[in-house]
């Protein structure tokens, strides 16, 4: 009697948080269950466990034979891998889940996270661009990310080569979020493994993919929608006509986010996408101030930057006010004057003294390189150049090359007609149809 009374109609206990996470993971990892289907099943059946029990019957009704839900052992293995990677599961109903991301119809039900989740509470700006970014492109990305981070934004990007890498490095001190296309414990490209460790320690890594998953081509557009969903605006710094950065921009437009772009030289294929975005209405970005003006990251009660504080205008006759407004508008359209180099006479004197000291000293022999090494070096230099002139010493520093390797390679490329020197010690890549 006691056993019968104990096992009769007593309502089941509510599932623990761990049980809920486990069931949700099993549901999401089951075949043909994506984010939209997951949310629909949860709404129809009330819980992930009820949805799991109903899935096989639903599959048979749909004409699918032999359908099996994700096994408990597969989810247990994923949880073990997550523990080893110190990853935390962020559910869609977690208070720390970003509200902006939750607005997506395809919002990720579950996100693996490694790092400080407090970065999700700050205003976010996405910064994306070409993997084969030019020296100017990576420099622009660094400048934007650094200034936006200092202004209070968290910089979001995809940990890819080129612009993404530059953006993460520059914003690491103030806050950055890397959204991965694969699992949180699979860093792609592998050359960014050290950077990913730094982001995990100081920033935040996010992924909706299972742990240990190597990213596939189809995973990158999914990653891009998360980048766009997190941010209140997406900045594109260099993008070819058909690139993942433009996919992110389209996702942002579909979500009602603002798209901003850095213009580039018309002859540079890497600038085609940005210029097209600007032509179609994207906000042109010259510096971080353009972004800050449109999207203030300040919290209530914070002091505004001095550049944005405006004093109340004094009372003036209407004609004088019109003249003042016109003059201010004309002044705003004028490009800023370049800073005058400081201490030019001292630098010239130092250079002259160095030249005299080196007079009569034989030049060091050129570095010996194989044909493969020479070709790789040439391609590295050409990839860092575009139609827009670039300072040779800046390019050398950006590429991390020594003067002994850089100078002879420039001469070789110049003799081959692949680069040109322009006044001011600047370099530019010659187009294929340009003759010299």
Image (cartoon, helix red, strand yellow):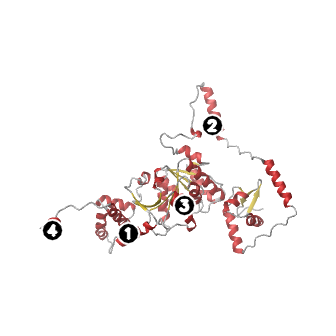
- The residue wearing badge 3 is 198
Residue 181 locus on image (x, y percent) = 49, 64
Q: Which mark is residue 3?
A: 4
Residues packed near mark 4 inside 10 Å, few (<14), some (14 to 19) or many (20 plus): few
Image: 125 above or below 418: above
Q: Which mark is residue 75?
A: 1
Residue 28 locus on image (x, y percent) = 37, 65
Q: Cβ–Cβ below 8 Å for labels 1 and 2?
A: no
Q: Secondary structure at mark 4?
A: helix
Residue at screen point 17% across, 65% down: 6
Q: Cβ–Cβ below 8 Å for labels 3 and 2?
A: no
Between the C-alphas of marks 1 and 2, the distance is: 61 Å
Q: Secondary structure at mark 2?
A: helix
Between the C-alphas of marks 1 and 3, the distance is: 28 Å
Q: Nearer the viewer, mark 1 or mark 2?
A: 1
* Sequence-first tag of 1 and 3: 1
Q: Nearer the viewer, mark 4 or mark 1?
A: 4
Residue at screen point 66% across, 63% down: 383
Between the C-alphas of marks 3 and 2, the distance is: 44 Å
Image: 122 above or below 211: above
Q: Which mark is residue 329?
A: 2
């Amino acid at each position: 009697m006691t056993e019968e009374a104990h096992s009769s109609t007593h309502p089941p206990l509510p599932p623990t948080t761990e049980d809920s996470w486990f069931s949700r993971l099993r549901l999401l990892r089951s075949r043909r269950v994506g984010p939209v289907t997951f949310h629909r099943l949860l709404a129809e059946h009330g819980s992930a466990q009820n949805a799991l029990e109903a899935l096989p019957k639903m599959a048979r009704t749909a004409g699918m034979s032999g359908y099996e839900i994700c096994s408990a052992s597969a989810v247990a293995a994923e949880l073990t891998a997550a523990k080893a990677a110190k990853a935390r599961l962020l559910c869609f109903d977690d208070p720390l889940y970003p509200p902006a991301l939750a607005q997506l119809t395809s919002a990720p039900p579950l996100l693996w996270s490694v790092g400080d989740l407090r970065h999700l509470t700050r205003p976010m700006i996405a910064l994306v661009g070409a993997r084969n970014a030019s020296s100017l492109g990576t420099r622009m990305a660094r400048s934007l990310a650094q200034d936006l981070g200092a202004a209070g934004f968290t910089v979001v990007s995809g940990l890819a080569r080129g612009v993404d890498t530059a953006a993460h490095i520059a914003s690491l001190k103030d806050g950055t979020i890397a959204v991965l296309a694969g699992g949180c414990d699979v860093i792609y490209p592998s050359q960014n493994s050290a950077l990913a460790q730094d982001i995990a320690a100081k920033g935040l890594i996010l992924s909706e993919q299972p742990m240990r998953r190597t990213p596939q081509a189809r995973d990158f557009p999914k990653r891009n929608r998360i980048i766009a969903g997190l941010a209140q605006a997406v900045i594109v710094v260099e993008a070819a006509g058909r690139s993942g950065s433009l996919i992110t921009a389209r996702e942002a437009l579909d979500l009602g986010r603002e798209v901003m772009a850095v213009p580039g030289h018309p002859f540079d294929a890497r600038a085609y996408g940005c210029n097209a975005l600007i032509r179609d209405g994207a906000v042109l970005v010259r510096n971080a101030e353009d972004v800050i003006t449109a999207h203030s990251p300040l919290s209530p009660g914070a002091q505004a930057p001095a550049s944005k504080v405006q004093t109340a205008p004094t009372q003036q006759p209407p004609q004088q006010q019109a003249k003042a407004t016109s003059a201010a508008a004309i002044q705003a359209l004028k490009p800023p004057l370049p800073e005058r180099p400081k201490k030019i006479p001292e630098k010239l004197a130092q250079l002259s003294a160095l030249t005299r000291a080196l007079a009569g000293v034989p030049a060091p022999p050129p570095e010996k390189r194989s044909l493969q090494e020479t070709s790789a070096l040439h391609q590295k230099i050409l990839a860092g150049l575009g139609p827009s002139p670039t300072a040779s010493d800046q390019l050398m520093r950006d590429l991390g090359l020594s003067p002994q390797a850089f100078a002879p390679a420039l001469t070789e490329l110049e003799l081959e007609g692949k680069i040109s020197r322009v006044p001011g010690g600047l370099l530019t890549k010659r187009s294929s149809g340009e003759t010299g």
